[in-house]
Amino acid sequence: MAKQLDLNGRRFWIMSEPEGVGWKAVVLEMTAGDAKEDLGIEATAATRTAADDAAERKLRRLLQPD
């Protein structure tokens, strides 16, 4: 499963898949030519929605100006 986000003029995908009894979500940034860059953001939770939401919160915190 995947969820696309457009933030600050950048395009991100939250990719999630089952892991054990829960779900794991990772964040990728789509760059020029649709190359994918792993940002190292991961989140796990009991449901896909919860894992996706946790990964999105981590991404938004990373992108906040200091």
Image: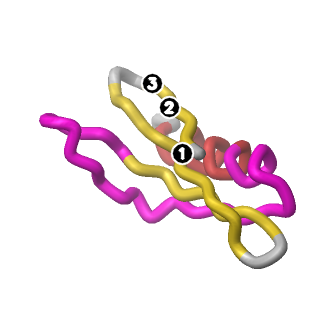
**CA neighbours of label 1 inside 10 A, class few (<14), some (14 to 19), many (20+):** many
Q: Position of residue 35 (x, y in %)?
A: 21, 46
Q: Residue 11 magenta-drawn?
A: no
Give whichever of 50, 10 is nearer the camera: 50
Q: Report the residue at 50% width, 29% height from top.
A: 5
Q: Which residue is mark 3?
A: 6
Side (left or right) of 17 relative to 49: left
- The residue carrying mark 1 is 14
- As shown in the figure, which amino acid type bears the numbered disc 2? Gln
Q: Is residue 43 left or right of residue 38?
A: right
Q: Please give the residue where the numbered disc 2 appears in the rendered image.
A: 4
Q: CA distance from mark 1 to mark 2?
A: 6 Å
Magenta span contains residue 51: yes
Q: Give SS at disc 1.
A: strand
Q: Nearer the viewer, residue 5 or 58?
A: 5
Q: Amino acid at mark 1?
A: Ile
Q: What's drawn in magenta, residue-wise?
A: 29-52
- On screen, residue 32 versus residue 2, left or right, reads left
Q: Are marks 3 and 2 in contact (CB under 8 Å)?
A: yes
- Closest to the camera, between mark 3 and mark 2, is 2
Q: Earlier in the sequence, mark 1 or mark 2?
A: 2
